[in-house]
């Protein structure tokens, strides 16, 4: 009978240890929440109804604004390796404008990211979640993701219905639009504590698409929907669209 | 006493198992998911496929059968008339028999000749221009093309969800009845990737089970000397993209892989097609302009436009060929037809 009791005790212990494991994990990690505000020169984007003017004096509206953020990692005294997590930021879907990552407890001084979907994932077959072709960000004729997409209208556009369409993609060779970027945080600004939440607020300024290293003019190029040098030039502009506006350690 | 110990032991083990499983979160694997796993067999003497297309898509009988049903199902097209199989007919080695361009939704034509579907596990890129990087994402192109199946992926999934059979079939193939684009594409890949053509007369000769006639042997000798670099055995393609010196069709202005690579050096380069089952896949070339093997060989003899800057270096002198050599070569090419594959019930609707 004693054997029975000890056996039962053993099994229950196994169960308890098994359960505790996840609690221990929770004590060693916290949550990093990224919250994005898409703007035009600091003013939150209003889809469809508001007319904006770019630095070339051209008027435009925005009906779609979507892009991928992936491979996010934080660095500091500790660092966590970039994980293959993919987030589709879609201005028309408020739920997509913030997302959370579980990261080890530490103080972090930097965040790095990929604006786009890494090349390996572009050629790995059918995907799901943020990368599901249902999200209308996958080219069916030239396998690969549209890394960033803007659609709208402009009186300066010469194509059908004055459309403006920038579908920016391409992950191979010299025309790759993949933009790896990062932020240095002041001091140990992101302080991940056990089971607690830290939130980083990022502003994405669409206005940066029009200039930087290349003057994108609607009159010249109202639509860019294939990989190539033009798409590459636009990505060289938009890689500068992010700034951190606030960090909160709750 | 012994009995009681055993009883107590079993009860405690059961209890622990329940507790442990209760502790796990998000455990969605159902206990009834028990698919029949299949082996993908590389024919003897063939190279290993360059990548394992089933690495993230374990091949199962249930997945294969679901893929086959999807392949033959008009629900994947807008009006129900254009399943994958409407352009990829088994008796034509899964090409479109006797059509330069296939027919699509609303009396439209495709803009390229439908290729045969077999030995896809060895194919590194799909489409004549190499635009498709993986067999799983290939079906997205014809399903959504307005001149092919003209449907949206959203609508296909809605139709499959409303069907009486599919939820059950997805469950047996993937463990739950969720119907997602990824699962649909993986199932199609399991079916298409399983179609292997390796039992033509040529294969039987190679295995010592048959022998060539003297004409076939002469043709094979000529083939080895003049064609084999690009149409590499045993797959009869080297998976490369080459310009074979054809005039640009002014209706199509199709410049091949340059559209994908944006590199002018790739202008007019198209995928080297496999010559397996070539007798069944006529007409030939990316736009189906050659209606017979004789016409293709005449192009190589006398038709190649040698002034095109991207013409393949192997073709700058064209391919000299007597009429006898041409006839022998056609006899040899006829030995590449594989009726075991074209008549296999396993691949049939």
Image (cartoon, grey):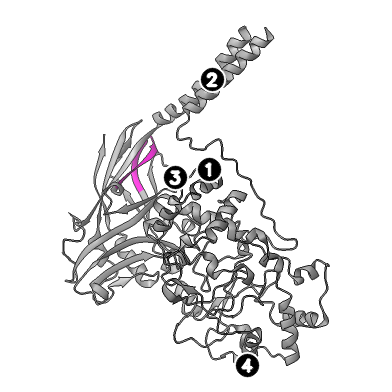
Would residue B55 be visible to someone looking at this image? no
Q: Are marks 2 and 1 on the same chain?
A: yes
Q: Residues within 10 Å of mark 1 (few under 14, many from 20)?
A: some
Label 4 secondary element = helix
What residue is shown with label 1?
B175
Q: Is residue B78 above or below residue A77?
A: below
Q: Is residue B81 above or below residue B30?
A: below
Q: Nearer the viewer, mark 1 or mark 4?
A: 1
Pinpoint the chain carrying mark 2: B
Residues in magenta, as a range:
A98-111
- CB under 8 Å between discs 2 and 1: no
Label 3 secondary element = loop
Residue B203 appears at what percent x and percent y?
76, 68
What residue is shown with label 4?
B302
Q: Are marks 1 and 3 on the same chain?
A: no
Residue B80 appears at what percent x and percent y?
46, 64
Pinpoint the chain carrying mark 3: A
- CB under 8 Å between discs 2 and 3: no
Q: Residues within 10 Å of mark 2 (few under 14, many from 20)?
A: some
Residue A162 occupies which quadrant of the picture? Answer: bottom left
Q: CA distance from mark 2 to mark 1?
A: 26 Å
- Name the foreground residue: B202 vs A124: B202
Would residue B263 appear left or right of B120 to someone viewing this image? left
Q: Quadrant of the C terminus of chain A?
A: top left
């Amino acid at each position: 009978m004693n054997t029975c009791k000890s056996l039962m005790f053993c099994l229950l212990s196994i169960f308890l240890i098994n359960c505790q494991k996840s609690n221990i994990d929770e004590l060693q990690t916290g949550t990093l929440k990224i919250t994005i505000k898409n703007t035009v020169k600091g003013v939150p984007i209003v889809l469809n109804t508001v007319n904006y003017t770019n630095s070339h004096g051209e008027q435009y509206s925005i009906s779609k604004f979507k892009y991928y953020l992936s491979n996010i990692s934080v660095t500091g005294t500790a660092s966590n390796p970039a994980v293959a997590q993919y987030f589709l930021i879609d201005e028309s879907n408020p739920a997509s404008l913030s997302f959370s990552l579980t990261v080890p407890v530490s103080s972090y001084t930097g965040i790095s990211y990929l604006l786009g979907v890494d090349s390996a994932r572009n050629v790995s077959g059918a995907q799901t979640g943020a990368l599901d072709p249902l999200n209308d960000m996958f080219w069916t004729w030239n396998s690969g993701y549209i890394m960033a997409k803007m659609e709208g209208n402009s009186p300066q556009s010469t194509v059908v219905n004055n459309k403006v369409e920038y579908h920016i993609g391409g992950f191979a060779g010299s025309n790759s639009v993949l933009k790896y970027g990062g932020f240095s945080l002041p001091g140990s600004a992101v302080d991940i504590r056990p089971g607690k939440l830290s939130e980083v607020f990022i502003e994405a300024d669409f206005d940066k698409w029009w200039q930087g290293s290349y003057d994108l003019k609607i009159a010249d190029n109202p639509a860019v929907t294939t990989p190539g040098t033009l798409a590459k030039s636009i990505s060289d502009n938009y890689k500068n669209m992010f700034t951190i506006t606030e960090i909160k350690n709750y | 006493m012994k009995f009681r110990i055993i009883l107590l032991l079993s009860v405690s083990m059961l209890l622990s198992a329940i507790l442990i499983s209760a502790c796990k979160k998000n455990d969605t694997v159902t206990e009834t998911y028990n698919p029949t796993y299949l082996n993908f067999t590389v024919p003897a003497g063939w190279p290993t496929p360059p990548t394992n297309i089933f690495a993230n898509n374990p091949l199962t009988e249930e997945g294969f059968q679901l893929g086959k049903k999807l392949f033959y199902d008009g629900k994947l097209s807008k009006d129900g008339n254009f399943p994958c199989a409407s352009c990829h007919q088994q008796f034509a080695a899964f090409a479109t028999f006797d059509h330069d361009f296939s027919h699509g939704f609303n009396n439209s034509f495709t803009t390229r000749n439908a290729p045969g579907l077999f030995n896809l596990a060895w194919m590194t890129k799909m489409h004549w221009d190499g635009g498709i990087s993986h067999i799983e994402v290939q079906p997205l192109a014809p399903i959504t093309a307005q001149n092919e199946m003209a449907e949206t992926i959203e609508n296909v999934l809605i139709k499959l969800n409303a069907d009486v059979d599919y939820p059950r079939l997805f469950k047996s193939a993937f463990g739950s009845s969720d119907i997602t684009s990824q699962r649909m594409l993986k199932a199609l890949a399991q079916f298409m990737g399983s179609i292997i053509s390796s039992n033509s007369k040529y294969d039987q000769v190679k295995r010592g089970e048959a022998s060539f006639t003297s004409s076939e042997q002469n043709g094979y000798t000529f083939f080895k000397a003049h064609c084999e670099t690009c149409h590499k055995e045993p797959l009869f393609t080297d998976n490369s993209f080459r310009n074979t010196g054809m005039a640009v069709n002014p209706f199509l202005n199709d410049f091949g892989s340059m559209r994908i690579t944006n590199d002018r050096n790739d202008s007019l380069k198209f995928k080297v097609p496999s010559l397996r089952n070539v007798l069944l896949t006529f007409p030939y070339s990316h736009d189906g302009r050659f209606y017979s093997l004789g016409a293709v060989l005449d192009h190589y003899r006398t038709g190649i436009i040698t002034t095109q800057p991207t013409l393949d270096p192997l073709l700058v002198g064209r391919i000299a060929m007597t009429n006898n050599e041409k006839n022998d070569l056609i006899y040899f090419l006829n030995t590449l037809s594989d009726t075991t594959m074209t008549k296999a019930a396993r691949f049939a609707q």
